[in-house]
Image (tube, rainbow, N blue to C red):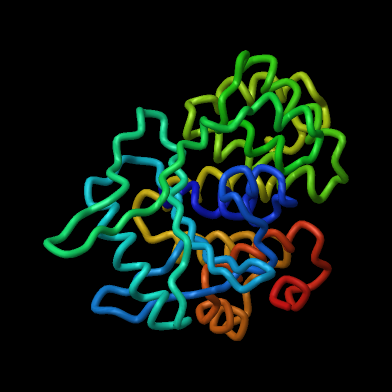
Amino acid sequence: MNEYDIALKSVLRKLAGSALRELTGCQVTRWHNVEFAAVQSRTADMLGETADGELLHIELQSANDRRMATRMLEYAAQIQRQFDRLPRQLVVYVGKSPLRMLRRIKGPDWTYSYRVMDIRSLDGDALIARGQLEDNVIAILARLRNERVAVRQILERIALAEPGRRAEAFSELLLLAGLRSMEPSIRKEAKKMPLLNDIMDHKVIGPAIRQGRKEGREEGSRETALRMVLRLIGDRFGPVPESTKKRLAGFPEPKLEQCAIRIMKARTIEDVLS
């Protein structure tokens, strides 16, 4: 799900304890940026920590993976080595087809299990009713009674946001809507709202969404994030200095995501990197 990783993790990290608490059963107070050293480098999607020090590891899946249990066991072992604590683990399934992944594996003398949750178990209409922007955006993946009505309500909420956040939320919504084949209906409804119709043709947001989706199918999510940030900086400030490229090349994926978010409000390149 490389082309959706950046948008989905960005929205989940901003949830103010509402939908995220329903998914995880706990309140994350901070997120860790973590990449594991291994024969094949592997980065956990989200690793958070609660106020009492409990680690919560979340993986996002848009397709059923028959080896998911093995992957999660490997993550658990790596987290234990790095933090000297075993995490609670949750796979959040955001795909369109029915969930079919195993939740446990057994050995001769042991059993390993983790939680798997289909994001459609969340009530999307209840998320929209809360009025919080991030809840509204993530609702596009949840269970909806009437998709057309829900799309209109989500877009109305985005249109009321302050300009910088409005563009960001709309681009996130378009990317996530691709997981439900709802992007055409969102574009159609957005054309009826002048504030959002302008964003669709924005010289920065529009090309970044289209190109980011194409590249996401071909590269890892970190490389996709890096290319997108470089493109956004170039569109906003002109040619990207080599010193900036070198700094960005050393950033982990979560920090690249934050850079992408800052671009709409940043006055200088340094504002993006800070």
Quadrant of res 123: top right
Q: Along the line of sight, which residue is nearer the eye, 175 or 191?
A: 175
Along the line of sight, the residue nearer the viewer: 30 or 136: 30
Residue at screen point 73% across, 62% down: 263
Above or below 274: residue 49: above
Which residue is drawn at the image coordinates 67% and 57% (left, top)? 27
- Asked whether, in this view, residue 241 is left or right of residue 166, the answer is left
* Residue 11 percent location from the top left of the image: 64, 49
Count every numbered label the image shows and give the total: 0
80 in relation to 209, above or below: below
Apparent side of residue 161 relative to residue 170 in the rendered image (left or right):
right
Q: Residue at x 15, y 60 (%)?
A: 107
Q: Quadrant of the C terminus?
A: bottom right
**Residue in the foreground of this view, choosing between 100 and 157:** 100
Asked where in the image residue 209 lies, by quadrant, the reply is: top right
The image shows residue 2, relative to residue 49, as above or below, that is: above
Q: Residue 38 location in percent, x, y?
A: 29, 79
Q: Please identify the residue farthest to the left as the structure is shown.
A: 108
Residue 185, given in percent of the width and then of the height, sits at 59, 20
Residue 211 x, y percent position in the rendering: 50, 48
